[in-house]
């Protein structure tokens, strides 16, 4: 299974992915985590990404696409993966589609975790990660609205989007996520209609 999780900053993508990993048994590709490791390891990519992350902006598409494609080429991703926080722009989404097509792979489904702004701010104040300063967090929400929210329409038009309510306990949300995944599995297992 190849699944993407989309949601605003602090929506709980990472939290739900940790649970989903055991369920799906596929590698977890969190671009936020990959970037944080690159920054703390002082790699070239990390040095390029740091100023964007510190100011609440998305890092440039070229940088993130390079990192993700290298990771997707590794053999453990052949059977599937859980994409957490990627793609985040229409350009990243189009690049992912092209990459998967070249590799004869498909994206099974996209889950949107929908959470209102007030709750995102409340969670951010509790989490206190370095990029969770209130002013920076507001910029990250704005970037989400401007650059990432258009992906919902992009994937809805492909018939791949399942939006779920991201409010409630992590367990309640996980059961909604699992229901969405079951829907993707059922579609994945349907025989192809070649009557057309
Ligand atoms: P991410 O690491 O993806 O950060 P995030 O969106 O803030 O986190 P997430 O939604 O995973 O929330 P979490 O589970 O932690 O990205 C960080 C930065 O990297 C971006 O701002 C950007 O600069 C850069 N970046 C990453 N990918 C990129 C890309 N593709 N292109 C360009 N730039 C990119 O949950 C948040 C908090 O809520 C936690 O404290 C958690 O305990 C709590 N929580 C979770 N579920 C809850 C629930 N149900 N109820 C209450 N609290 C809950």
Image (tube, helix red, strand yellow):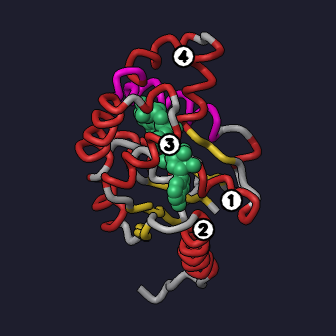
Task: Kindly identify which residue carries mark 2.
Answer: 174
How packed is label 1: few (under 14 Cα within 10 Å), some, or many (20 or more)? Answer: some
Task: Kindly identify which residue carries mark 4.
Answer: 46
Compared with 67, 114 (above or below) is: below
Of the two numbered discs 1 and 3 in the rendering, the one whose residue sits closer to the viewer: 3
* Sequence-first tag of 1 and 2: 1
Q: Do the residues labelled 1 and 2 touch (CB within 8 Å)?
A: yes
Task: Kindly identify which residue carries mark 3.
Answer: 126
Magenta residues span 54-72
Real-space Cα separation, disc 4 to disc 3, in angstroms: 26 Å
Looking at the image, can residue 179 be seen? yes
Is residue 142 found inside the magenta-colored segment of the image? Answer: no
Of the two numbered discs 1 and 4 in the rendering, the one whose residue sits closer to the viewer: 1
Real-space Cα separation, disc 4 to disc 2, in angstroms: 32 Å
| Quarter that holds the C terminus | bottom left
Give the overall secondary structure of the magenta segment: helix
Task: Kindly identify which residue carries mark 1.
Answer: 19
Compared with 156, 128 (above or below) is: above
């Amino acid at each position: 299974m190849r699944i993407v999780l989309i949601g605003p900053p602090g929506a709980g993508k990472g939290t739900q992915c940790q649970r989903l990993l055991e369920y799906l048994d596929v590698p977890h590709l969190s671009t936020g985590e990959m970037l944080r490791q690159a920054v703390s390891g002082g790699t070239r990519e990390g040095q390029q990404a740091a100023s964007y992350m510190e100011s609440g902006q998305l890092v440039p598409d070229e940088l993130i696409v390079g990192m993700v494609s290298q990771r997707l080429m590794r053999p453990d991703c052949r059977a599937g993966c859980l994409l957490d926080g990627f793609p985040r722009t229409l350009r990243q989404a189009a690049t992912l589609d092209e990459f998967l097509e070249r590799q004869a792979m498909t994206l099974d489904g996209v889950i949107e975790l929908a959470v209102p702004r007030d709750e995102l701010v409340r969670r951010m104040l509790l989490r206190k990660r370095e990029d969770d300063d209130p002013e920076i967090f507001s910029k990250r929400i704005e970037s989400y609205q401007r650059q990432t929210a258009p992906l919902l329409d992009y994937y809805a038009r492909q018939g791949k989007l399942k939006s779920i309510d991201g409010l409630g306990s992590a367990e309640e949300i996980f059961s909604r996520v699992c229901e969405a995944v079951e829907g993707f599995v059922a579609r994945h297992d349907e025989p192809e209609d070649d009557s057309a």
